[in-house]
Image (cartoon, rainbow, N blue to C red):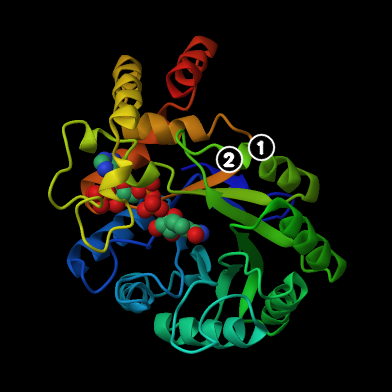
Amino acid sequence: MKYNLCGNSGLRLPEISLGLWHNFGDVDDFNVATSMIQYAFDNGVTHFDLANNYGPPPGSAEINFGKILAKELKGHRDELIISSKAGHLMWDGPYGDGGSRKYIMASIDQSLKRTGLEYFDIFYSHRYDPETPVEETMQALIDIVRQGKALYVGISKYPIDKLTEAYEILKSQHVPCLIYQDKYSMLERTPEKEHMSLNEKYGVGFISFSPLAQGLLTTKYLNGIPENSRAHKAHGFLQESEVTTEVIKKVSALNDLAAQRGQTLAEMALAWQFQNKHVTSVIVGTSSLNQLKDNLKATDNTHFASDELALIENILK
Ligand SMILES: NC(=O)c1ccc[n+]([C@@H]2O[C@H](COP(=O)([O-])OP(=O)(O)OC[C@H]3O[C@@H](n4cnc5c(N)ncnc54)[C@H](OP(=O)(O)O)[C@@H]3O)[C@@H](O)[C@H]2O)c1
């Protein structure tokens, strides 16, 4: 595993991190979840990405991760980077959603309790909340760091003007933003437009989520929607309507190129991320040990010839 420095900080993150959004809730197989965390750690994945609402039910991914940590990774806390977030709907009433100080402060305490951790390495504002001043959310994150409940601050899914405001506030109080997390893959290129250069300007790292477009950038949907796939599951966030003929045509052409490179499509789609110098790490989600093993092979060949990159652009345009 290669470990990249995160922005201007002294913290290194593994090129591949593991996310617990799907596949680690109470609806999932705990033994599979355990084997994936164990295999990941044994193979150099030091970073695990959580949020208060991961499950289903919301909160169960944190509880399950806490159980696995206590049983399988006891004594390894200082070798791990564990993140969590607050920002999306978590509990009823006006204080369980958004970016208010009330919500963020209560939520991190709940997340610490569920995981059994004394602190998170990174704590994120999970989304921009138009109803809360950015200053209020950032002050809560700064205070969380000063209280020792998290070591670093992260931000996810902010529009560019609000992100700039957030970076300025954090910098002015000497708690600089460590990392920005957004959706980035061959099929979702928006962060390339403005966010990545802003991160470079402020010395903030970038971590991609849904780097396989929730499974679209694998061979799984080439011949329809299989049972037990995220698009098929009732609680899966990938909608059947997103598996379009147009997308599958592109995916099929990408798969041909991956075969020529001697990689699976998932491996190539992850490897492609690393030719972008702005990307510190990618967070994969996996529903089986075999998927995780496949994805970890992506780092074996991250070199792309210029004609391969041109072909990829041509397929994606
Ligand atoms: N900040 C945010 O708002 C935000 C939002 C979304 C995600 N995230 C983070 O990013 C993480 C990753 O997101 P994601 O789960 O959408 O990532 P992803 O890697 O794009 O998609 C994961 C899914 O792709 C399929 N897959 C993965 N590897 C495969 C392989 N080698 N072969 C075939 N299929 C494969 C599996 O689908 P099946 O289940 O169908 O097998 C798996 O559940 C999350 O866990 C979370 O930590 C953050």
Q: Say left or right for 312 vs 3.
A: left
Q: How many marks?
A: 2
Q: Is mark 1 within 8 Å of ligand 1?
A: no
- Tell me which residue sits at (25%, 52%) in the image: 230
Q: Is residue 280 visible?
A: yes
Residue pushed farthest top? 307
* Residue 95 coordinates in the image, percent (x, y): 55, 87
Q: Quadrant of residue 266?
A: top left
The residue at which mark 1 appears reads as 193
Residue 117, compared with residue 155, is above or below; it is below
How far apart are labels 1 and 2 at the CA level?
6 Å
- Element type at marker 2? helix
Left or right relative to 289: residue 7: right
Name which quarter of the figure residue 157 lies in.
bottom right
Asked whether residue 292 appears in the rendered view, the answer is no
CB under 8 Å between discs 1 and 2 = yes
Please rate how many residues cluster around mark 1, counting C-alpha atoms within 10 Å: few if below 14, some from 14 to 19, many from 20.
few
- What number is the disc on residue 190? 2
Residue 262 in the image, given as x and y percentages of width and height: 31, 20
